[in-house]
Image (cartoon, rainbow, N blue to C red):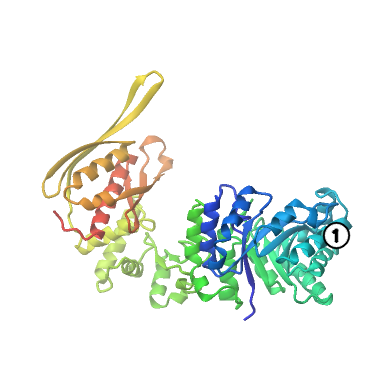
Amino acid sequence: MVHVQAYDTTLRDGAQMEGISLSVADKLRLVTVIDSLGVDYIEGGWPGAIPKDTEFFRQAATLAPDIRARLAAFGSTCKPGISAKDDSQVLALAESGASVVTLVAKSDPRHVKQALRTSEEENLRMVADTVSFLSSRCEVMVDLEHFFDGLAFDATYGLNVALAAAQAGATTVICCDTNGGGLPHSIADAIRAVRTMLDKEGYADVVVGMHAHNDTGCAVANTLAAVKAGARHIQGTVNGYGERTGNANLLTCIANLQLKMGYDVVPPQGVRNLSSVSHTVAEIANMAAFARDPYVGHSAFAHKAGLHASAIKVNPDLYQHMEPEQVGNARRMLVSEMAGRASIELKAAELGLDVSHDKELTGRIAATVKAREAEGYTYDAADASFDLLLREEMGTAPVLWRIESWKVTTREVTVTPESIFTESEATIKLHAGGRFVTTAEGNGPVNALDNALRGALRGVYPQVDQFRLRNFKVRILDEDRGGTDALTRVLIDTEDSRDIWTTVGVGTNVIEASWEALLEAYRYGLVRAEVTPA
């Protein structure tokens, strides 16, 4: 198999995405996580220009012996009129301790003249001098900035910059679609032109690479086209992070190249780690995971239509392009008004319940789901509520308590004209091995209900103290009715030390819907803990 080098630039280019700010500690953690993919290179940042990145490389020296990837430092060529050996920024790269340096070089003559304010000849001198100076100390790669736009403007200058880098000792020249405006056919033509030129000039051993941005939505497609045209080095970021619309999603590129196109990119275990790396990086970057990301997204192998479920029950390949386990993901069955008996059977099995023996039961459950969804409930995002519904229909749901009544009040308290606050108080009366009346305050009505319910159940079911509300989503369902009497749906995410589960409630107001979802959250958590009813 032909090997294609994978170069991750999440720590630098990915960190330029709006909403992402990585500390040195974050970057060090990310190196370990991304290294589990088995990529060839991980770019750490720009030492000498960014103090945080200088500190990163100082601390990363202790990581180097324990990781597979080679850490790359990013920087620019020497300035016009200055030799590389006298340029402080180039010296910072040399002293960073990185075993690889990736230099950004202007390859569009318009940028040379208008941004660098120098001549085309001086820019070639800057590239050659900097590469030559650094290549005696470490491996040097050159990012040809604005390469494709430059080639469209001047068919030869970008090629001359690539040749100057190769002649000076660069191991790899990377063609960058910096503005992200390229399309696959033009990208492929340009890559072939670079590869042909280097071969003709006697530099067949110099690798051609691709660095794509996603402004046309084609970053992954452009990367694949570049490899087909002769590129053997790809750059990208985990989850496609990057400025504007992002960079090529390195995870998608790896999966496509290795599983679909037959290239060797990362070890087999690295492919199986794709999903976990995606989610862990999102967590460290404090970004929400995108459910519909190819291969690794939570919805990538989710099936909702009843027809799909019937076919998957016979042969999963009929409605899946691959086995999700190959990339560390899993098939999910979504239960909705579209669900038939096959969907119910598969989803129940996914939850550890067997209903395959009873067609009447599965038909009844499917009918109940349809009726409930017509009332505003949704189960494709609330597995815990569906689990409880299954148990109710199967007659195996334990009765853990009986609610006698509940109420919640919110009042505004004026301490001084400048100090006004609201307080909520909930009272719950329930039976669970005895009658309990509990009142609790909270930061809002839902928090007050949560505190009161926990207080009422704690003495009978101490497991409830492990439950924590993690997320709370409200949606108005029939906005066309208008105003305050619209039907409301609430989804609550609850967690303990082992797992997270989601429950749903529907009501004529947000408090009523929240109360139902809250009760189901506690009930599911206790069923999962296999408690004995009081």
State the residue at coordinates (83%, 76%).
200
Kind of element beneath mark 1: helix
Instruction: Please state if 341 lies on the left or on the right of 149 as rendered.
Output: left
Picture coordinates of residue 322, whole percent (x, y): 49, 74
Which quadrant of the structure image shows residue 167?
bottom right
Q: Up-down: is 20 above or below 530?
A: above
Instruction: Please state if 218 lies on the left or on the right of 329 as rendered.
Output: right
Q: Quick one: 17 or 186, which is closer to the camera? A: 17
Q: Quick one: 177 or 125, which is closer to the camera? A: 125
Q: Up-down: is 418 above or below 273?
A: above
Is there any visible trace of residue 337 in the rendered image?
yes
For badge 1, the amino acid type reads: Arg
State the residue at coordinates (74%, 55%).
90
Picture coordinates of residue 186, whole percent (x, y): 75, 65
Q: Residues within 10 Å of mark 1 (few under 14, many from 20)?
A: many
Q: Up-down: is 348 above or below 487?
A: below
State the residue at coordinates (60%, 78%).
262
Q: Quick one: 357 or 126, which is closer to the camera? A: 126
State the residue at coordinates (51%, 61%).
278
Picture coordinates of residue 246, whole percent (x, y): 62, 55
Is there any visible trace of residue 180 in the rendered image?
no
Which quadrant of the structure image shows residue 174?
bottom right
* Residue holding disc 1: 125
Picture coordinates of residue 312, whole percent (x, y): 41, 73
Q: If the image is split into quadrants, where does the N terminus sit?
A: bottom right
